[in-house]
Image (cartoon, grey):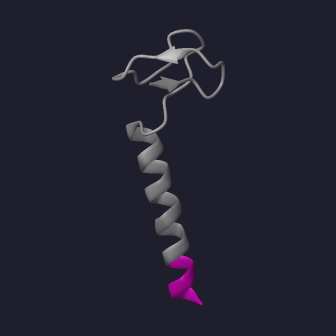
Amino acid sequence: MQYCRKCGKELEDDARFCQQCGTAVRGTYWEDVNVAADDLIGKVKELIR
């Protein structure tokens, strides 16, 4: 069972957004993209040094 990290409402197993407050549920596509971008930036900075 998952709960919204912002308002605490119980979420459906397949929910992508909280029905109460609209907050995106962790593990959404855009969150994965942001994490991948952060990793890429870190690797590029390491190569430049």
Frontmost residue, 37 versus 24: 24
Q: How many marks?
A: 0
Q: Position of residue 27 (x, y in %)?
A: 43, 40
**Residue ID at (60%, 13%):** 21
**Residue ID at (47%, 43%):** 31
Q: Position of residue 26 (x, y in %)?
A: 49, 36
**Residue ID at (63%, 19%):** 8
Q: Position of residue 16 (x, y in %)?
A: 41, 24
Q: Quadrant of the C terminus?
A: bottom right
Please determine whether, in this image, residue 38 is positioned above or below residue 32.
below
Please identify the residue farthest to the left as the structure is shown.
14
20 horizontally vs 6: left or right: left
Frontmost residue, 35 versus 1: 1
Please determine whether, in this image, residue 5 is positioned above or below residue 38.
above
Range covered by the magenta-colored residues: 44-49
Q: Is residue 30 magenta?
A: no
Please identify the residue farthest to the front as the structure is shown.
1
**Residue ID at (58%, 14%):** 9
Frontmost residue, 29 versus 45: 29
Please identify the residue farthest to the top as the structure is shown.
20
Q: Position of residue 38 (x, y in %)?
A: 53, 60
Please determine whether, in this image, residue 47 is positioned above or below residue 20.
below
Q: Tell me which corner region of the image, top left, top right, bottom left or bottom right, holds residue 7.
A: top right
18 horizontally vs 21: left or right: left
Please determine whether, in this image, residue 16 is positioned above or below residue 43.
above
SS majority, magenta: helix
Please identify the residue farthest to the bottom as the structure is shown.
49
Q: Quadrant of the N terminus?
A: top left
40 horizontally vs 9: left or right: left
